[in-house]
Amino acid sequence: MVLKAKERGIPDIEIGARYGISFSYLQQIITDAYGVNISVLKGPKRIKRWEPKNFSEETTTVWSFKQRGDWATHDGRYRGNWSPYIPRNIILKYSKPGDVVLDYFVGGGTTAIEAKLLGRRCIARDINPGAIGITLENLNFIPPRHLFSEGSLPFYEPEVSVGDARNLSDIPDGSIDLICAHPPYAGIIKYSTNIAGDLSKCSVPEFLAEMGKVARESLRVLKPGGKCAILIGDARKDKHVVPIGFQTLRVFLDAGFILRELIIKRQHNCKTTGFWYARSIKYNFLLLAHEYLPVFEKPMVRQTSEQIPSWEYTFPHRSLAERVRTVEEESLETTTVWIFPPECLPAEIKRNLLRRFAPPGGVFVEFQFGKEIQELDILPGQVPSLIYVHPPHELADEQAIAGYRNAIVKIAQQARTFLPPGAFLVVDVKDTRVGPTLWPMGLLLWEDMTAQKEFLIKEIVIIVQARPSPGRSEEHLEIVHRYLLIYIRK
Ligand SMILES: C[S@@+](CC[C@H](N)C(=O)[O-])C[C@H]1O[C@@H](n2cnc3c(N)ncnc32)[C@H](O)[C@@H]1O
């Protein structure tokens, strides 16, 4: 009955209500019946246009596509597929016509469609034969001549097959120009029920171990200097974030990749009003509204993260403490992406932190990196409920980065002596670039803090200044986001 209703095109929410089943059970019924997790049971749509309207390449580190993109055969039929704007941007930035693009988690074929339209060779794989069937259906088009006319793009039909991303043994070493892929986020969406090796059946630790194999194979098949872009998101458990994004980043760095960009991809399917607003406030959690898109590079000479040196350096800082003032009743942020105009950005960060994480009358301590003082300045008898560590002005080189990391660890060590259980420590931090290498400061501080056993990560918030200036550098994206790493004292 459920499948018949689905075939008749009845919306999922109505099917759920009619037959008393949850959304995940509905997905399971569909996946069992069709061997693949699809949202709409119909063939590819009729093509209305071949390219996105008014397209221009992204220039900053925050990517946001309000419309997912519906040119060529792109649609939302394959559950959890990515917006075609993502592979289009990645392919245009990091490859040239005729280059070989590999997507080993191709799902419904989004990357392969873009590679075909943009004149790149493409190797497209997925462990699920059902997904490969949909990819082939979606690739069943002949692009118009004007895309490939003289002096313009070459034309290549993608090579599509069933395959396992952990074992690319039939692809020679150093033969791929670009990897552009979107794995399952561990078990958040189940893509099959009985296919061995489907990473969507893994727990988070299993997933990270298997992604280690994928990362090592990726490094092997890429040409030196070749790029590897991976979209990955976090999960939530017991009202705390599970940072699968940072953990996957670490897996690829440990495999020997260098990080070139760390892009934040905003998600627009979050419910932020009514019922969800009330829940988010009542249970004090933020709805996940961002994913990470790291762009790695295979080094010319193999390098591992162990070779990154660490320096002894004391970062000077200044601190101040103040009583919480009464703040007006205004609506609060409910998702993990906070966007404020530049003129009220510091005030809005503070207001949201105070209202969410500091009880009325609690003590809010701000910590700013400045010139002289070395200790946190807590007045006698004060019990802070929230410490907010501002970002440093500039991290110009590797020594400054190492010094800043030491300073944050010292602050956490001091803070644990006087923060009561349930109080919060918030670190505001921005990724930084030293030469061409991107230092993922959010990830590095999260790792340093994970060693501080008294603190548990509660939220990772992305802060973006509204109306960011357009990216200036041709070579790199402009970094326009920061992270708030929000910890709770155990
Ligand atoms: C998030 S989806 C990819 C969606 C794709 N970007 C699109 O736009 O359609 C992840 C895909 O990884 C596939 N997958 C899971 N484990 C795999 C493995 N070991 N090797 C290859 N593909 C795998 C799943 O079948 C699923 O299609």
Image (cartoon, grey):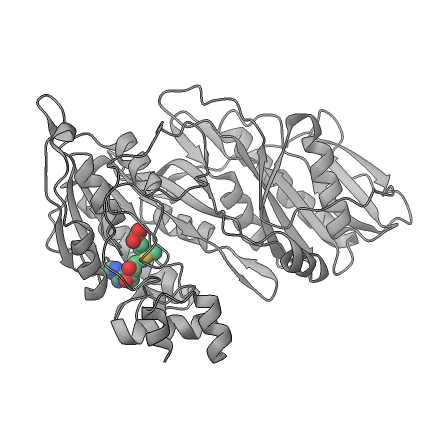
Answer above or below: position of 10 versus 402. below
Q: Where residue 297 sits: x, y (%)?
A: 30, 37
- Residue 257 visible in the shown view: no
Residue found farthest to the left? 150
> Is 87 on the left or on the right of 451, as rendered?
left
Q: How many marks?
A: 0
> Is 342 on the left or on the right of 258, as rendered?
right
Quadrant occupied by the C terminus: bottom right
Q: Where residue 382 sits: x, y (%)?
A: 88, 48
Quadrant occupied by the N terminus: bottom left
Using the image as rendered, state which of residue 323 and residue 28 is in the foreground: 28
Answer above or below: position of 375 versus 453. above
Residue found farthest to the right? 381
Q: Where residue 269 sits: x, y (%)?
A: 49, 51
Answer above or below: position of 381 versus 196. above
> Is 448 on the left or on the right of 434, as rendered?
right
**Residue ID at (38%, 60%):** 208
**Residue ID at (21%, 36%):** 224
Q: Where residue 198 sits: x, y (%)?
A: 29, 67
- Residue 157 visible in the shown view: yes
